[in-house]
Amino acid sequence: MRKMLFLVLCTGFLSIASCDAAKPKPLVYNGDTLPMSSLFTRRQVGMVKESAGLPEVSGIACSRVTPGYLWMQSDDYEDRIVATDMRGINRYLKVKFSKTIRWDWEDMSGGVYNDTNYLFIGAFGDNDETDGNYHIVYLPEPAITSEQTEITLTPSSIRFVYPDGKNHNAEALMYDNIEQVIYVITKVYYNVCQVFSLPFRLDYGNEVQTLTYVCDLGVRSDLGDGANPFKGFHLVTAADISPDGKYILVKNHNNIQAVFSWILLWEREGDESVAETLRRQPVALDCYQYEWQGEAMCWLDSTTFFTTSDSDGEPPIYQYTRRSDTALPAIEAQPDRPQSARLVRLNGVLYLRYNEHLYTLDGKKLR
């Protein structure tokens, strides 16, 4: 049953890419050289085709209401999102928003709250740090069916400020299903990036919220003495937390020095918070290869995640699969069964409801 719940699509579409080419150089993080993990393999499973109608994809999220699809948002359009298959070839649903909240959308995430699956969009890019008008846009995730190819919805948003009272540029957003908290990570050039949090609620209204500082990612000394400011971890562009809350991914990109781009992985231990996890040392994934303008990443489940970029043209979509799970077969997405699977929370525990049966997030059937 696990193979039906967690969709590892496109088997045989393209062979697993070699991880030997363009390997990143060792990363110094918090004063130590991080171990390079071979836990995941990487392969290209498709590309964001022009037919999807969404250029410069800066955020993606796996559909939880209609499994088998990727939601995408653009750095170029601030009034729409689209759903494609996981190869990015065909657009199945375009969601236009009845109002534009703010320009410069940078990241996207999905999550469950009060038994409803939501999509979150980080409308908080600010390269020059002069805007200060930052929002988290959210809406209940719509179902994808063959009957509708375009709908118009009215999103909600949470306006926020940073606790230091300053403007910041950010390009990474993630949501934790366990804590039900949104996390924002700043993108900083040649300095450490910072993590901030905000509990998700539906009743914030028009009140401006102040984020809470969580931690730094790395330390300033990792960036060197100025002679080589590219080697440390900075320029964060994407992040995501697995649906079961077990794993946290944060990626950066450095278009000046491509070999200094990484995906970092943290594994949550026991009941610790996201903040406690991020304060520990991560591992760097050795199979990650540099993507020009690599700004989009999302978990499918705790074994599989995807990345793509917001570069011009038709950027590749890459699938990363835990090595012990590479043999899982694929199944086709089912647009005419919009409620085939969804995350639910019962007594504080997350489960997957599939065809009226309940499963743990690792695929064990309960009832």
Image (cartoon, rainbow, N blue to C red):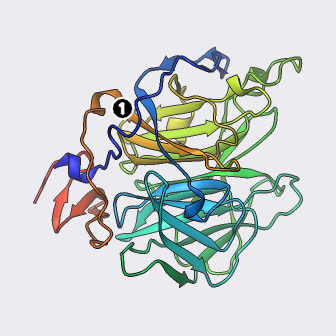
Question: Horizontal placement of 62 versus 29: left or right?
Answer: left
Q: Residue at x 54, y 75 (%)?
A: 95
| Residue with the mark numbered 1 | 322
Q: Is residue 118 above or below residue 215?
A: below
Q: How many marks?
A: 1
Residue at far left of view: 367
Tell me where residue 327 appears, x and y as whole percent. Answer: 25, 33
Q: Is residue 202 above or below residue 106?
A: below
Tell me where residue 75 appears, x and y as whole percent. Answer: 70, 59
From this viewpoint, is residue 36 visible? yes
Q: Residue at x 46, y 68 (%)?
A: 118
Question: Horizontal placement of 336 versus 278: left or right?
Answer: left
From this viewpoint, is residue 272 visible? no
Q: Amino acid at mark 1?
A: Arg
Q: Which corner quadrant holds the C terminus?
A: bottom left
In the structure shown, which secondary structural element does the residue marked by tag 1 occupy?
A: strand
Q: Is residue 71 above or below residue 241?
A: below
Question: Horizontal placement of 249 versus 349: left or right?
Answer: right
Q: Quadrant of residue 92?
A: bottom left
Q: Residues within 10 Å of mark 1 (few under 14, many from 20)?
A: some
Tell me where residue 304 appears, x and y as whole percent. Answer: 39, 41
Q: Residue at x 65, y 16 (%)?
A: 25
In depth, the one of 355 and 198 nearer the eye is 355
